[in-house]
Image (tube, rainbow, N blue to C red):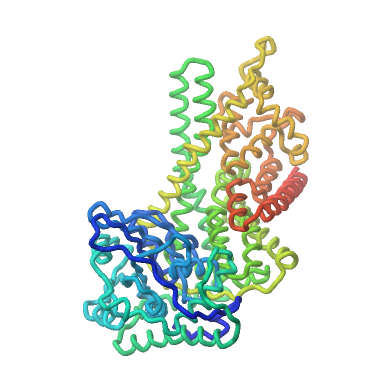
């Protein structure tokens, strides 16, 4: 049920402003111009389905989920049907907002585009996406937008999956709102109907008489000023003033629009889908239960990580077999020499050693997509909100953390939804500790090789537990460090957490498979570009300079390979850093792997594959795991990769910030190198200390 907002809810933070004259709108394009180009923007509540509609119109791949906070940046793309009409459209997808009073960076960003306060940005049409499952709050937002814009406005009612909006209801909505209305279910993908609606529908009433600024100037300027603090370069043509009167009027305006929306719904007997609401409430009694909710949360995510081993093992073995067979076939077809070494030891050992992890990555993101679509992720945020409050963070930090399990970069960007700047900085500085998918190949390789597989308590698998522990350890460390930051450098109160719970819905297997394919394709693209390139660099450094033939006389094939590698440029770099990492149980080859992984964490596996393809490996070994087991420490003469060494490496990857892209996005979001350098420094200290402790305990 929608609730009226109070003064404190409606106006947070910065001073209010008052307007003397409304901002003039930019000229619109002439519809009769041949091959003219216009821009339309998508606005609406968070989780109303804007990104789904954007993908439908543009053929794009913006991530969609059944919880708010996914879209925190601006996406732009052309209509896929532009070639079929004499008018071209550019579509801009904006982050969601609940009303015209932004309380976070992403909401302020949307308002700046809607009011044309962004430099060199204009538009001609607005598509207001109304969520049929949250009709009252959606219409309240729509009414407030219609009060302040002069452009053609269209309303798309999304999530009408049961086709409840018949012709009569549609007519009533159009009469009350004064704009064209189209009900649809975006997941069904009816592009032709939506495209025709956009191209051939315009606001029926005169723009000049239908759009009057009554209370709107006060409301808009009060709200617009609240995102100036985010340094968006906005300069308002309004007079700024402070006072409680402005706050009261803003709150009254928001409540007035909600009241009008409810009156309209009651009058014309337009109701939301009560059956679906009742089902969601019944599920929530268990999913949000103080005791059983936590048990369900732990079970869901344990099964998620456990599936990486149990479901993906056959597919992984099949993929590895194909890679090895192809490498052997090509190797037998080439004469001995540098070319064969380049292809077999450089390309197949490097890229092939990473590609075999493709099944695990695709299965993980397939299951994550099912959870996101179902609506459970929002419940998970509520479950952990109380826990996160102990560490100085609100529930809104959970969603960036959750995004961090895929990649830290979108997670850091998702932190824009956190209104409290100090809380936001504490979140983005600890978010790289969350176990991202780039760590996944390293975890799978080392856990699968050195952690024995056996049942625990007759129910749980030891390798799955180890995997779950690594994820848990990274998450716990992020929370503990966040608490330290919130008690010191970023000291202050936590922001209130208000989560809009979507209704539970049946996830689409088609969407989940598509999201899994996108992640797999992205992974393969990285393997075919970045990993391939660095694998070739590693091969060059491990091959040159060549050792003089006199030093190789009388040595076996494996001894020759080992000596050439040690005398190469890569071997010399590794030996130079070996004294630093020897206390961690690592030799120069592992050091090279750690160094290379700063380009991307999964490159550690690629580096190991390239290094051990020319290193001291048993000629009967198959795959990288056997080669790691067979390697011998040159100092002690014992196996290099023991359980202690494996966990030492794992601890370094849990805590180390080995990602230059993450450092770059930290710099971009914070505006300076201070935050990324501090983050890199403290995480390196954590990684080294944890690796040292793990090695000493297990050796």
Q: Residue at x 23, y 63 (%)?
A: 196
Q: Residue at x 54, y 53 (%)?
A: 407
Total labels: the figure holds 0
* 459, 256: nearer the viewer: 256
Residue 456 in the image: state x and y as whole percent.
60, 54
Q: Quadrant of the N terminus?
A: bottom left
Q: Is residue 689 above or below residue 175?
A: above
* 469, 31: nearer the viewer: 31
Residue 555 in the image: state x and y as whole percent.
66, 14
Task: Report whether 535 appears left or right of 120.
Answer: right
Where is residue 600, by image quadrant?
top right
Q: Residue at x 59, y 54 (%)?
A: 668
* 694, 142: nearer the viewer: 142
Q: Is residue 590 above or below residue 675?
A: above
Residue 46 in the image: state x and y as whole percent.
45, 69
Q: Is residue 282 above or below residue 337?
A: below
Task: Report whether 199 appears left or right of 347.
Answer: left
Asked whether residue 628 appears in the rendered view, the answer is yes
Residue 678 in the image: state x and y as whole percent.
71, 53
């Amino acid at each position: 049920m929608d609730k009226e907002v109070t003064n404190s809810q409606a106006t947070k933070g910065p001073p209010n402003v008052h307007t003397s004259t409304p901002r003039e709108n930019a000229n619109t394009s002439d519809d009769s111009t041949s091959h003219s180009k216009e821009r339309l923007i998508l606005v609406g509540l968070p989780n109303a389905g804007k990104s789904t509609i954007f993908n439908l119109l543009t053929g794009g791949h913006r991530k969609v989920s059944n919880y708010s906070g996914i879209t925190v940046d601006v996406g732009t793309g052309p209509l896929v049907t532009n070639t079929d009409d004499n008018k071209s459209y550019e579509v801009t997808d904006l982050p969601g907002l609940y009303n015209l009073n932004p309380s976070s960076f992403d909401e302020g960003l949307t308002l700046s585009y809607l009011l044309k306060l962004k430099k060199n940005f204009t538009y001609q049409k607005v598509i207001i996406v109304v969520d049929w499952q949250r009709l009252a709050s959606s219409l309240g937002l729509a009414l407030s937008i219609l009060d302040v814009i002069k452009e053609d406005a269209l309303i798309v009612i999304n999530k009408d999956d049961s086709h409840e909006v018949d012709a009569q209801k549609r007519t009533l909505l159009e009469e009350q709102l004064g704009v064209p209305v189209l009900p649809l279910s975006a997941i069904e993908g009816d592009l032709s109907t939506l495209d025709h609606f956009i191209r051939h529908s315009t606001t029926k009433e005169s723009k000049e008489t239908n759009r009057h600024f009554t209370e709107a100037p006060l409301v808009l300027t009060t709200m617009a000023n609240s995102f100036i603090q985010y340094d968006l370069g906005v300069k308002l043509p309004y007079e700024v003033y402070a006072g409680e009167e402005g706050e009261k009027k803003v709150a009254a305006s928001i409540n007035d629009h909600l009241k009008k929306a409810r009156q309209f719904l009651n009058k014309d007997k337009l109701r939301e889908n009560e059956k679906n609401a009742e089902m969601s409430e019944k599920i929530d009694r268990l999913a949000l239960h103080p005791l059983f909710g936590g048990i369900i949360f732990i079970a869901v995510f344990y099964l998620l990580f456990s599936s990486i081993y149990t479901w993906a093992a056959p597919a992984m073995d099949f993929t590895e077999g194909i890679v090895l067979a192809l490498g052997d076939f090509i190797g037998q077809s080439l004469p001995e020499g540098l070319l064969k070494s380049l292809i077999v030891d450089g390309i197949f050992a490097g890229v092939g050693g990473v590609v075999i992890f493709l099944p695990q990555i695709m299965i993980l993101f397939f299951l994550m997509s099912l959870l996101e679509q179902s609506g459970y992720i929002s419940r998970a945020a509520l479950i952990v909100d109380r826990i996160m409050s102990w560490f100085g963070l609100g529930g809104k930090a959970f969603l960036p953390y959750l995004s961090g399990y895929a990649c830290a970069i979108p997670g850091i960007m998702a932190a824009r939804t956190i209104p409290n700047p100090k809380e936001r900085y504490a979140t983005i500085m600890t978010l790289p500790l969350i176990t991202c998918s780039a760590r996944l190949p390293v975890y799978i390789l080392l856990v699968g090789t050195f952690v024995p597989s056996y049942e625990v308590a007759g129910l749980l698998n030891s390798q799955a537990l180890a995997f779950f522990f690594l994820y848990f350890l990274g998450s716990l460390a992020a929370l503990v460090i966040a608490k330290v930051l919130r008690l010191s450098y970023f000291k202050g109160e936590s922001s209130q957490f208000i989560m809009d719970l979507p209704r539970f819905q049946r996830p689409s297997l088609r969407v989940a498979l598509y999201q899994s394919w996108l992640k797999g394709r992205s992974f393969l693209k990285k393997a075919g570009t970045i990993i391939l390139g660095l694998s070739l660099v590693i091969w060059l450094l491990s091959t040159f300079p060549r050792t003089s033939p006199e030093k190789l006389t009388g040595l076996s094939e494996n001894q020759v390979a080992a000596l050439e590698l040690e005398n190469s440029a890569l071997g010399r770099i590794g030996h130079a850093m070996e004294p630093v990492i020897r206390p961690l149980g690592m030799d120069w080859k592992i050091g090279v792997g750690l160094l290379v992984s700063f380009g991307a964490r999964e490159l550690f596996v690629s580096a190991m594959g390239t290094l051990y393809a020319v290193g001291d490996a048993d000629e009967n070994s198959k795959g990288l795991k056997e080669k790691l087991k067979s390697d011998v420490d040159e100092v002690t003469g014992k196996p290099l990769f023991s359980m202690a060494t494996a966990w030492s490496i794992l601890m370094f990857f849990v805590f180390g910030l080995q990602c230059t892209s993450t450092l770059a996005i930290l710099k971009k979001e914070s505006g300076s190198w201070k935050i990324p350098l501090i983050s890199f420094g403290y995480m390196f200290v954590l990684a080294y200390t944890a690796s040292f402790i793990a090695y000493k305990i297990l050796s």
